[in-house]
Amino acid sequence: MECNELDQNQISLIRQIVRIHLGLDVPTDSAGIFEKKFRGACQELGYSNCRDCVAALVARPLSRKQVEVLASHLTVGETYFFRDKKTMDTLRDHVLSPLVQKRKSSDKKIRIWSAGCSTGEEPYSLAMLLTTLISDIDLWNIHILGTDINTLSLGKAIKGRYTRWSFRGLAPWIKQTFFNKIDEENFEVIPKIREMVTFSYLNLAEDTYPSILNGTNAIDLIMCRNVLMYFAEDVRAHVTEKLNRCLTDKGYLVVSPAEASTRRFSLFSAHNIRGVTLYTKQNKQRSESTSVGKSPLPVLSETHDGKNEKTETTVVEMLKEKKSDIPKKPEVKRGSYNYAEILYMRGDLRGAINELLRCEQSTQVLYLLTKAYADSGIFSEALKWCNRLLETDKLGAQNYYLQSTILLELSKEEQALEALRRAIFLDPKFIIAHFTMANVIRKKSINEASIYFKNALRLLKKLPYDTIVPESDGLPAGRLLELIEMIESERSGR
C-alpha cells in the first residue's frame, strides 16, 4: 500500500477528521512519518490504498471503531517499566509513602488511575511500588485502573507478558521479584501484581468520568503522561477539568514535563519536587464552580440554537458529531431534578447533591443522588441513599447494580456479589452486571467467572458494535466484547 499519492489537502482533511471526532492534533512535521502511520490505520481498516480510505472516511460519519483505529496509529504508545526514574522515585517518597502512612490507620484504601496506560507497564509499576511500601498489602483495598483507547495495547496489558525491551534500565531485583521467566526473551508479571490492576477501555475525549460505574471516581493519584499533548487545546482543557473532578481533595495529577503548564493546569496547585512537577487538586469550591469552555450557570435558563456563525461548509463540518454535556434548550429551574441533572453532567457534584436534597424523593432523584455521592467518593452516604432507593424501587435491576459498585468500594465483597445476583435475576440480559460479577469472582473461581464472561459475550454479540452498553457510562458493546475476549484468551493461554 502506498500513501505518497496523498496531497497536502488530503493530509489536511485527515487531520481535520481526527481533530473533529477525537480532539487530537496530529503532528505532520516529520516527512513521511504521518503517511506511514496513516497507512497502518488504512490496513487495519481493510483498505488497499490510502486514497480509498480517505474517501470512505469523508463519505459518512465515522464509526467509533474507525476513530479509535486512527487514534491508535497516529499517536505514540511506547513505554516501559518504571519509566522516568526521577518521577517514580518522587512518587514513591512524596506521594505514595505519605499516603500509605495516612491511610494505614483509617480505611487502608488507595485509588490510582493510569490514563492512557498503553501496554500496562505504568500501572503494574505502581502496583510493584505499593507492594514494597505496604507489608500487609493483602489487608488493603488497592484500586489501580489502567485505561486506554487502543484495545490491542489493552490486550497485551491484560496478558502481562513482556520482552526484554520493557525492562531497560530496570534494577535486576525488580525483575526477579515481580516476574516469572517464560524464556530468555519473555517474562510474565506475577499473579499477585496482576490482580492489583484492572484494565478497561476509556476514551478521554468522549467518555464519562468521574463515575463510580467505570472506577474513575475519588482517585488519589492520576497518571496521565504523554497523553494530553495529542489533544487540541480546547479538548485538553475539558479533559483536564474532568481529571480534576476525578481526584480526591489534594489528590495528585502527574503529566509529562512536555505537558506541564501553569496556564493549562490553573485548576491545580503546582509543586516542584526534585525537578518533578506534581499537580494537586485545589479546594473543592473552586474546582466545582469553574467550568472550562462553558458559561456560568445562569445560561441554563436561556434559549439558543447552538449555531456557530463561523461554521464552514466543508464535508468535514457536515460530519461533525461532537457530544454535548448539556441540552441545547434546557427548561430548568432551581430545586428541580432537571437542574440537578445538568449540574451533575457538568461535574458539579456538590451542587447537584444540594439541588437533589431539595427535590421530592422520587426514584430518579434517589438514583442520581446515590450516584452523585458515590462519584464524590462519599461511599457511606451513597450506600444510605441507595438503600432508600431500593426501598422505593425493589424491582429495578440497575439499582442493585449501583448498590454493588458502592459495596465493592466499601470492601463488602460478599454483599456486593449478592446485589449483583439480584440484578441479574431481575434482568438476565444485564450485560455489565454479568461482566462485573465475572471480574469480582475470578480471583476465587475462574470457572464460575468464565460462565458470566460467556453470558456477557453472548449478549454483546447480538448488539451493533457502537451500541452503548447500559449502565457502563459510555462503553461501546464492541469494545467490551473485545475486552472480554482478551481476558478469556489470557485465561485459556491462547
Image: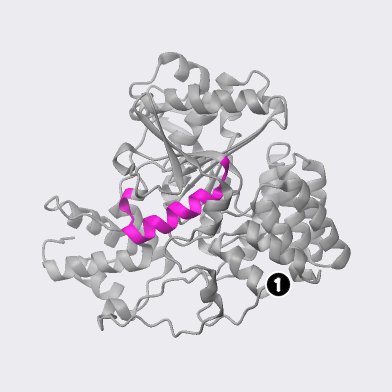
| Residue 98 visible to an observer of this rendering | yes
Nearest to the observer: residue 426 or residue 2: 426
Q: Is residue 241 magenta?
A: yes
Q: Is residue 492 visible?
A: no
Crowding near the residue tagged with mark 1, few <14, some 14–19, many ≥20 C-alpha atoms within 10 Å? some
Which quadrant of the view contains residue 398? Answer: bottom right
Instruction: Read off the residue under disc 1.
Output: 335
Using the image, determine if residue 78 lies above or below residue 289.
Answer: above
In percent of width and height, residue 405 lies at 71, 50
Q: Is residue 352 above or below residue 302?
A: above
Q: For the point 33% across and 21% down, which residue is it? A: 169
Q: Residue at x 35, y 26 (%)?
A: 164
- Magenta range is 229-249
In percent of the image, x 46 and y 71: which residue is there?
Answer: 323
- Under tag 1, what secondary structure? loop
- List the single residue furthest toward the top: 173
* Disc 1 residue type (three-letter): Gly
Q: Residue furthest right?
A: 391
**Percent position (x, y) of residue 137?**
66, 24
Point 70% across, 61% down: residue: 354
Residue 35 magenta? no
Q: Is residue 294 left or right of residue 398?
A: left
Q: Is residue 436 above or below residue 298?
A: above
Q: Quadrant of residue 39?
A: bottom left
Q: Position of residue 183 (x, y in %)?
A: 42, 23
220 relative position to 181: left or right: right
Residue 269 appears at what percent x and percent y? 45, 40
* Left or right: 14, with 169 as reference point: left
